[in-house]
Each structure stands twice: as C-alpha cells, then as structure tokens.
Amino acid sequence: MDANHPLADFSQGALSGLKILDLGRVVAGPYTSRLLGDMGADVIKVEPPEGDVVRLIAPGHDQGMSALFQFVNVGKRDVCLDLRVPEGLAVVHDLLRWCDAVIENFRPGVMDRLEIGWSVIHEINPRAVLLSLNGFGSDSAWSERRSYAPILHAVTGILHDQSQYAGQPVAQINEAHGDTTLGLHGSVALLAALRVAEATGVGQHVEIPMYDAILGSYSESNNALLPEPDDRVMNPIYDAGMHGVIATAGAARLVWRTLADHEGIEDPDPQAELETKKKLRHRALETWMAEQPSREGILEKLAAAGIACAPVVPILEALTGPLARERGLLVEVDDRRGGTRPLVRSPARFSETRNEIRGRAARRGEHNHEVLADVLGYSREKIQSLEDSQVLSAGSPDER
C-alpha cells in the first residue's frame, strides 16, 4: 500500500498502534487479547512464574505448549513475572504507563489485593481502560465463587435447556463456550471504551460477568420467559441410515409439509393424535432419506424443496475438508517443538487491513529482555537484578 494512502497507517491491522497489557489467565482474558492482537494490537502477556495453567489443560503428550494455550496466546510477547513482590509490582506499574488497555479475568478483589486495581491503574494512567472479565460480577453475592466455563454452563441453565430440547440426559458442553462468549463481548466492550478514551483522554473500568454474557447471548433466553412454554419442534435432525445424519433448519411441521408436497411422500396417519402424528411423520422422512441412492441426492432434493440442510459431520472433517480448505481456515504455526501445528484463523476478513495470526505462542518469559529493555528502557544491570532475585523468570529453550 502506498505510504500516502489514507489507510497506510492501518495496513498492518485495524488496531495497529494499540497497546494491550494482558494479565489474563486460562481462556477468557487471553482469548480477548488474541483477537485484538490478530487485528494488529501489540499485546504483552504477563505470566506467573509457574506458568499459565492453560499450558497444562491438554492430554499428557500435549502439555506445556498445549493446543489451547497456543489457540489463545499466539502472536503475543510474554513476560514471566512474580506479582506478589514489590519489585514485580513495580514492573507492572511501568507497563501500565505504556499500555492503552489492561485485560484481566481474576476473581473480583484479586487485582486490588495485588495493588493493581482500577484506582491504581487510573492514577498511574488516566487514559487507560481496564477490562475485567469474571464469573458473576463484583457486586454479586457469588462474586467469590470459582467460575470456570463448565460451572457457568450449569448455573446459567443452558445445559438443562439443551437436554430438554434434545430429549437426552444433561451433559456438559465439550468446549469453553462461556469463556469464548465472554471474550467476544469483552473485545467489543473494550473497543467501545477505547473509542471514548481516545476522544476524551479518560479511561474507564469495564466489567463483564460470564453469567451475564452467556444469558445475554443465548438465543433461547427470551423464549424461556414466555408465559406459555414453547412447544414447537424446531430444526429436526434425521437419521438417513447408511447416508448418515441430516440436519435441517426450521419448524419440523414446515419441513414435513414442504418435503412431503415436493416429493409426494404420503402422510402415514392423518387422523392420529398430534404427538403420534409428529413421530410418524419424522419416521416417514427418515425412511424416505434412507431409500435415496446417496447423501448428495438427499441434500439436493431438500435444497430443491427450499429446505436449509447439511450433513452432520465430525469436527475434524469440518476443520480439514474441502470447505475449510477453500476458506483457508487453518494456518500452520510454529509449535515450539520443532514442527508446526494448525490453528484456526480469526474469521473477520478486512478488505484493506490484516487480521491474522502474527506469530507463534511464546514460552514463559521469552520476551523478558525485549520488553523490559526496549519497551520500558531498563538497563541490563536492572534486568539482571530482577532475574537474580527471581522476580523475573523464564522457561528453558527446550521447554515443550
């Protein structure tokens, strides 16, 4: 892009020049800063001496530089620092003067106990924004409770609601749904607060509880508040025998009527009572699908009838199949073990600016010297003193 182009300053990303101090742990906070980093923000992650526990949330063979750690921490600079001692706290205070925003997902009160709460941040850097992501809110009776995503999936009601919808026993969601939902809300709110800070020179404290974020994003929340229960059968899934499982979108009644009319499928028992009729019609469509010569043929006929549909596929197929390859969904990233590993790229595609993984995930304290010398201007002797006193630490180069 030409240096005189009006977007030249943003060619490396829409958030080029934005400086983020990431104090987050596990998923929610780091995921938020990773999204911003992909769009060009300079993210410095402060990791505790023992390392972020997300490095260990993995099968035994993948612990250390785990897939989940890399997923939420690619492209960041890493400083490994003991915040429990005054010397470590002083380094964080200097980083507060440098940054535009701080992201943290400790339990409420922890930042204040560490002496880096909102009042301290605002005094040191009045224009900085603090984003606090937690479980239930600092003003909640549940503020002190541990609030990992599986706990929030339970207490927000989404596990119960989905089990009722599926007619199956309650089962946990096998993903950090609450964390990534919180991270998405966090990135939007942080950018809004930064816009105000840029215009006024005054930062603010933004708090988002995971409880609120999940229920505020769950599309069935308002249906659950209706005075009468929602008795519709929605988005039916059909067992097509050897052709696998087919998902459709819309009310089951509409899917039946549309496909039956289009394909001439006879109503099994028009006089049956309602619940029996629903089951018989569902079974009739499954029988019709199983009798078709191919899965592709089923999908073509459903599409011709105007029914949105897709096969139910394993996630590995979704990640590596033809559609994923066409989308350029996966990016090979240095796995820090002598090879590479694929990671899913950020989904937003900008016509003029980059939004992409900027580099590999860091080892513990990999950028200690770079950040303290180049960003904060510390002398070699001061950095050495912090290392000698174990305020500053780092993983070994062969740490996996």
Image (cartoon, rainbow, N blue to C red):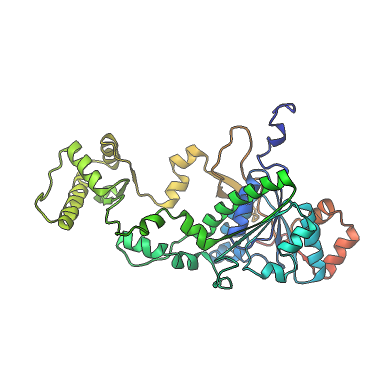
Residue 381 vs 311, above or below: the answer is below
Quadrant (top left, top right, bottom left, bottom right) of the C terminus: bottom right
Return the x and y of residue 10 as percentages of the image width and height. 69, 36
Residue at point 29%, 59% (across, down): 228
Query: In the rendered image, is residue 256 in sight?
Result: yes
**Is residue 198 left or right of 163 when viewed as pictured?**
right
Quadrant (top left, top right, bottom left, bottom right) of the N terminus: top right
Closest to the observer, 342 or 120: 120
Residue at point 31%, 64% (across, down): 168
Closest to the observer, 227 or 240: 227
Closest to the observer, 88 or 215: 215
Residue at point 73%, 43% (across, down): 17
Return the x and y of residue 159 as percentages of the image width and height. 40, 64
Residue at point 79%, 66% (across, down): 88
Query: In the rendered image, is residue 340 in sight?
Result: no
**Is residue 332 left or right of 153 when viewed as pictured?**
right
Total of numbered circles in the picture?
0
Residue 6 vs 77, above or below: the answer is above
Return the x and y of residue 308 as percentages of the image width and height. 32, 41
**Is residue 60 left or right of 370 when viewed as pictured?**
left
Return the x and y of residue 49 as percentages of the image width and height. 72, 68
Residue 121 vs 356, above or below: the answer is below
Q: Residue 8: name its quadrant.
A: top right
